[in-house]
Image (cartoon, grey):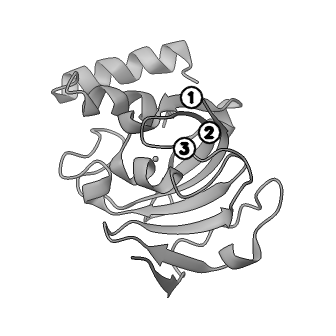
Amino acid sequence: MNRISLLSLLSLLCLGCVTGPEEVAAEKDKLNSSNPIPVVQSESSTETDSEIMPVGGTDEAGKGKFQKTNNGLKYRIIRQGTGKRPTAKSTVVCNYRGWLNSGTEFDSSYDRGEPTEFPLNGVIAGWTEGLQLINEGGKIELDVPSRLGYGERGMPGVIPPNAQLHFEVELIKVK
C-alpha cells in the first residue's frame, strides 16, 4: 500500500474541503505524486507498547505506563523534551508513525525520510491534545479513540470507520 501523509489529508477533511470518497482518492493520488513531507489516571500498557527505541533516550516515567485524559486520549510520554511547548494554535514540525490495532502501519514520516510541518489545530483532535503534553525534543505515544481520530467516516482506502489509532510522535520544533 502506498503511504500518504494522512496529516495533509486530515487538514482538508477538518476544513470540510473533502466531502466524498472520490475527492479523498484524488487528494491521495495528488499527495503520492508530490511526495508530501496526531484529570489524568495511569494504567498499564499492553497492546500499544512500541518496540522502536526513541532517539535521545526514554524518560524513566515513560516506560510502560499510559495516562488517560478526561477526553479519553491515552498517552505515554516517552521523552518529555526540554524546549518550547506547543499550544493548539502552534505550527509544529514532527516525525511520526501511525498504525492500526492490527499492527498495520498506515503512515510514517520516518519512511519518507523527512519530518512533517502542520498547524496543530488542523489535525485530528487526538494529536491536537496529545502534542500539547510534551515539549520540543519530546516523544509521545498516542492511543487515539475513534472519536478523537477519523470517527465513523474513517479515511477510505486507508483507515477503516471507527478505527482506534496508534501513533508515536517526536516533536522536533514548535514555530
Q: Mark 2 is on which residue type?
A: Cys
Q: Which mark is residue 39?
A: none
In the picture provided, is 88 more to the left or to the right than 60?
left
Residue 145 placed where, x, y %?
33, 63
Query: What residue sits 50% from the left and 61% below the top?
Result: 142
Residue 96 placed where, x, y %?
60, 45
Question: Label 3: which residue?
Answer: 86
Disc 1: CA contacts within 10 A as few (<14), some (14-19) or many (>=20): some
Gap in angstroms between the C-alphas marked 2 and 3: 12 Å
Badge 1 or badge 2: first in the primary sequence: 2
Badge 1 or badge 3: first in the primary sequence: 3
Asked if the residues shown at circle 1 and circle 2 are in contact, with their CB atoms under 8 angstroms apart, the answer is yes
Q: Is the residue 38 above or below the residue 144 in the image?
A: above
Question: Label 2: which residue?
Answer: 94
Which secondary structure lies at badge 2? strand
Query: What residue sits 35% from the left and 29% below the top?
Result: 11
In the picture provided, is 30 more to the left or to the right than 94?
left
Question: Label 1: which residue?
Answer: 117
